[in-house]
Amino acid sequence: SQTIHQWPATLVQPVGSPLSLECTVEGTSNPNLYWYRQAAGRGLQLLFYSVGIGQISSEVPQNLSASRPQDRQFILSSKKLLLSDSGFYLCAWRGRRVNEQYFGPGTRLTVT
Amino acid sequence: SQQGEEDPQALSIQEGENATMNCSYKTSINNLQWYRQNSGRGLVHLILIRSNEREKHSGRLRVTLDTSKKSSSLLITASRAADTASYFCATDAGGAGSYQLTFGKGTKLSVIP
């Protein structure tokens, strides 16, 4: 069966510090991968998606970047965090033959 | 902008009652999906309804889709305290290769024991 992991689960970082969040998927190959951000009490905002290694599409201009160095690994990064980067970050994958997405447990980021 | 908009934003009911949540969207879609999120957790896929379907059932869940009104509803029958969560609709509007979903802001359901 497929599983998706995210780490860390929680993170408190000062403004101006770098960020690296990691997401890995097991049990499937060549998935579509997605990074979302969820502000408190709000819906999900799609940040990045990837249809293959090294292929990243950005949905909103922002302080963040994403990379996909391996088929089942998706990384969200920032060189300098802003207060507005605080939120709940969710990684998701989608198989090639299905329409639904499967989400990881999320990372709660607080920028202080 | 958000494709899906859920209504109501919050709903509080007694255990055993039915809960109905609505979703409206703006553009043509391939399918519409409902997800559930427990507090502080990731989303879990509940049910998918295709644009050529009008109603779908899964256990205590019933989803309807009216493409002429660009709206969908999720009915949870005989609610339980464990159904307490936020529920999101998500629309798949297609687009070559992107396979994106656009999520609404969600309905927060509280089921009181």
Image (spheres, coloured by chain):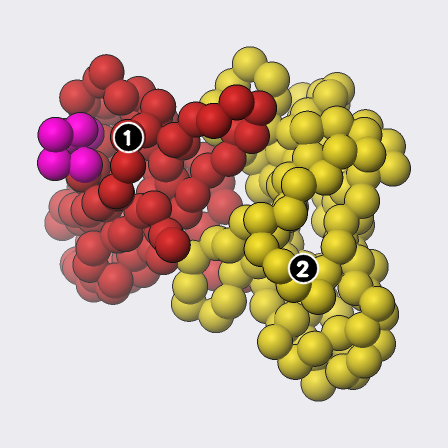
Chain colours: A yellow, B red
| Residue span colored magenta | B65-70
Q: Position of residue A85 (x, y in %)?
A: 65, 71
Asked if A41 appears above or below A110 in the picture, the reply is: above
For disc 1, the chain is B
Asked if B22 appears above or below A111 in the picture, the reply is: above
- Judge left or right: residue B101 versus residue A31: left
Q: Residues within 10 Å of mark 1 (few under 14, many from 20)?
A: some
Image quadrant occupied by the N terminus of chain B: bottom left
Which quadrant holds residue A54? top right
For disc 2, the chain is A
Q: Nearer the viewer, mark 1 or mark 2?
A: 1
Q: Residue at x 39, y 31 (%)?
A: B93
The kind of residue on which mark 1 rests is Ser
Q: CA distance from mark 1 to mark 2?
A: 33 Å
Q: Position of residue B107 (x, y in %)?
A: 29, 56
Q: Which residue is mark 2?
A: A107
Task: Check disc 1 and report its element: helix, strand or loop.
Answer: loop
Q: Position of residue A60 (x, y in %)?
A: 58, 55
Q: Which residue is mark 1?
A: B28
- Judge left or right: residue A66 versus residue B92: right
